[in-house]
């Protein structure tokens, strides 16, 4: 990578680290995201990767550190990376990371202006999220057995689908995060924001069955408070959950590539198709902006026609009139 990024040649003459040096600033900012914002390790890793890639591009343009970035060279960076094949969505995420870094640097008075405040990301053609059919969901959860790992997996995935949880959210749950009697789970989402979500009866039953057997996996690790633990008694890792879900889907004969976020997509789509309440689905998903939720409004025409005929007063009147005739 670039000289000052790779070698960390960011020390001032007096030996103190330069707060706007590419590497120093990214390290400090990522520590802030971890400690103060409580972002997941996966999210912080994405921030670090995006910021490091942008820093490398700036270095190629002879920009010494973050203070040397301006709107022109940032637009050039985005244009080059788009030309290299990076999608508009990835570039939007990358710009968001850089924008957040500059906001942090401004707050701590290391720089005065955010050079990417008005830099747009190239737009891709919007892709609809993948979802599972309800029949596939039913097949996924139909696998029965008394194996403790199967009981754990079923409880975890039932909870993800029942509440539309992100993978990081379900892995952060502790034993006391779920109130079985009230049928509610308290989730900590992005930005350390909490939300209370209702839990369906099937998920509650699956979690209850898992809790009755959870001690079998503790392996003497009685202090671990995670709701879902591995066969070593520790909190589950994201990679382990991804692999377990993939294996479970294959066992039930589902041909799709099934991954945890697909269950969240499916939850959102099925809820929206049934209720039509975009605001409620936004709250359940924990989206800060409703435009993020609008991607799930891909209802088919037949569903829209049924809703219209049932709800619109003029459509109902005409239907009733036809029946009288």
Image: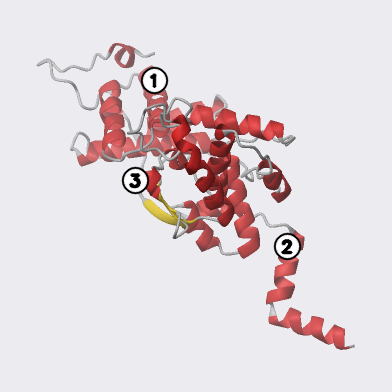
Inspect this view and state whether residue 64 appears.
Answer: no
Q: Residue shown at 66%/54% (left/top)?
A: 298
118 versus 43 height, above or below: below
Q: Residue furthest left?
A: 14
Report how many numbered discs are placed on residues in the image. 3
Classify residue 307 as left or right of residue 169: right
319 versus 13 height, above or below: below
Q: Picture quarter containing residue 300?
A: bottom right
Q: Residue shown at 51%/62% (left/top)?
A: 280
* Residue on which disc 2 sits: 303
Mark 2 Cα shell of 10 Å, populated few (<14), some (14-19), many (≥20): few
Answer whether labels 3 and 2 touch (C-beta < 8 Å). Answer: no
Question: Can you give x and y, in whole percent of width and height, for residue 96 in the image?
Answer: 40, 39
* Residue on which disc 3 sits: 192
Q: Earlier in the sequence, mark 1 or mark 2?
A: 1
Q: Secondary structure at mark 2?
A: helix
Question: Can you give x and y, in whole percent of width and height, for residue 44 in the image?
Answer: 37, 31
From the viewer's side, name the closer residue of 209 and 257: 209
């Amino acid at each position: 990578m670039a000289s000052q990024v790779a070698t960390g040649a960011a020390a001032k003459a007096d030996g103190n680290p330069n707060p706007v040096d590419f590497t120093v600033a990214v390290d400090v900012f990522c520590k802030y995201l971890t400690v103060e914002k409580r972002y997941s390790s996966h999210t912080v890793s994405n921030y670090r990767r995006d910021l490091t890639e942008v820093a490398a591009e700036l270095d190629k343009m002879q920009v010494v550190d973050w203070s040397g970035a301006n709107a022109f060279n940032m637009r050039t960076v985005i244009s080059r990376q788009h030309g290299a094949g990076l999608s508009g969505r990835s570039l939007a995420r990358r710009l968001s990371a850089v924008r957040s870094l500059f906001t942090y640097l401004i707050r701590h008075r290391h720089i005065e202006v955010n050079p990417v405040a008005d830099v747009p990301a190239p737009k891709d053609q919007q892709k609809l999220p993948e979802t599972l059919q309800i029949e596939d969901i039913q097949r996924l959860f139909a696998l029965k057995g008394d194996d403790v790992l199967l009981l754990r997996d079923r409880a975890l995935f039932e909870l993800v689908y029942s509440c539309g949880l992100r993978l990081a959210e379900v892995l952060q749950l502790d034993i006391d995060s779920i109130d079985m009697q009230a049928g509610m789970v308290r989730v900590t989402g992005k930005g350390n924001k909490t939300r209370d979500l209702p839990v369906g009866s099937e998920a509650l039953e699956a979690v209850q069955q898992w809790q009755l057997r959870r001690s079998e996996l503790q392996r003497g690790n009685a202090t671990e408070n995670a709701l879902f633990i591995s066969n070593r008694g520790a909190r589950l890792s994201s990679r382990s959950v991804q692999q377990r879900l993939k294996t479970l889907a294959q066992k039930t004969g589902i041909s799709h590539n099934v991954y945890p976020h697909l269950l969240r997509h499916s939850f959102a789509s099925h809820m929206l198709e049934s209720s039509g309440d975009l605001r409620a689905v936004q709250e359940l998903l924990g989206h800060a902006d409703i435009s993020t939720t609008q991607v799930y409004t891909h209802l088919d025409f037949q569903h829209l026609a049924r809703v219209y005929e049932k709800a619109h007063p003029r459509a109902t009147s005409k239907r009733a009139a036809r029946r009288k005739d």
